Amino acid sequence: MSNAPVDNSRRRFLTIATSVVGGVGAVGAAVPFIASWNPSERAKSAGAPVEVDISKLEPGQLIRVEWRGKPVWVISRTPEMLEQLKAHEDQLRDPQSDEPQQPEFAKNEFRSLKESIFVAVGICTHLGCSPSFLQGGFGEKVEGTDDGFFCPCHGSKFDMAGRVFQSVPAPLNLEIPPYYFIDDTTILVGGEQGEGAA
């Protein structure tokens, strides 16, 4: 062993340099690890809002889009369809939409922002089947109502505002997703006014 005096400044420098290199290495290893906790781009896009162009939507027509892996219906309701909504309120399980199946803006008799445009998640609230849109043929299911949605799996029936009829298996009205009109011909499904497309 050498009898040379110990150089404390050199020892301090080596200790600090080793600590800095070790710290940089730890941060370098931690960044990708922590980044792996973030959702993937695919997962982000699955929950991302969806723009729907309704410029070519004809009265009485239904178009389907996908949002968060669910079918979303966008329907242009005719004046006759809107008029029928008042005719059967006494036959509905939740005519005033008291159950929280819609955003606050859709807690009205039409369950929509605009009377003529109906936006709903096309999944039955019983077991998750997708009801059929019966235009003109719904009167066989509910007397006095020409248009509506019928779930062939277990017989649940919904009117043109997605409200469920009494005495069917579905316990709740159809879900109304958050959405807003970007302009007269474009709807953003999954977004709320003021959020933009984020």
Image: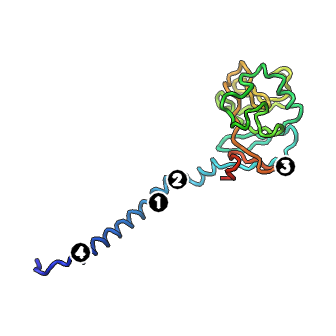
Q: Residue at x 66, y 28 (%)?
A: 99
Image: 79 above or below 31: above
Q: Residue at x 71, y 32 (%)?
A: 174
Q: Circle 2 sits in a helix, a strand or a loop, which is it? A: loop
Residue farthest along the bottom direction in this orientation: 4
Where is residue 44 shown, x and y percent of the image?
60, 51
The amino acid pointed to by label 1 is: Pro
Q: Quadrant of residue 82?
A: top right
Quote the CA–CA distance across marks 1 and 3.
Answer: 44 Å
For label 2, the residue is 38
Quote the CA–CA distance across marks 1 and 2.
Answer: 10 Å
Q: Earlier in the sequence, mark 4 or mark 3?
A: 4
Q: Quadrant of residue 10?
A: bottom left
**Disc marking residue 11:** 4
Q: Earlier in the sequence, mark 1 or mark 2?
A: 1
Quote the CA–CA distance across marks 1 and 4.
Answer: 33 Å
Q: Earlier in the sequence, mark 1 or mark 3?
A: 1
For label 1, the residue is 32
**Disc marking residue 55:** 3
Image: 127 above or below 187: above
Q: Residue at x 74, y 45 (%)?
A: 180
Image: 105 above or below 83: below
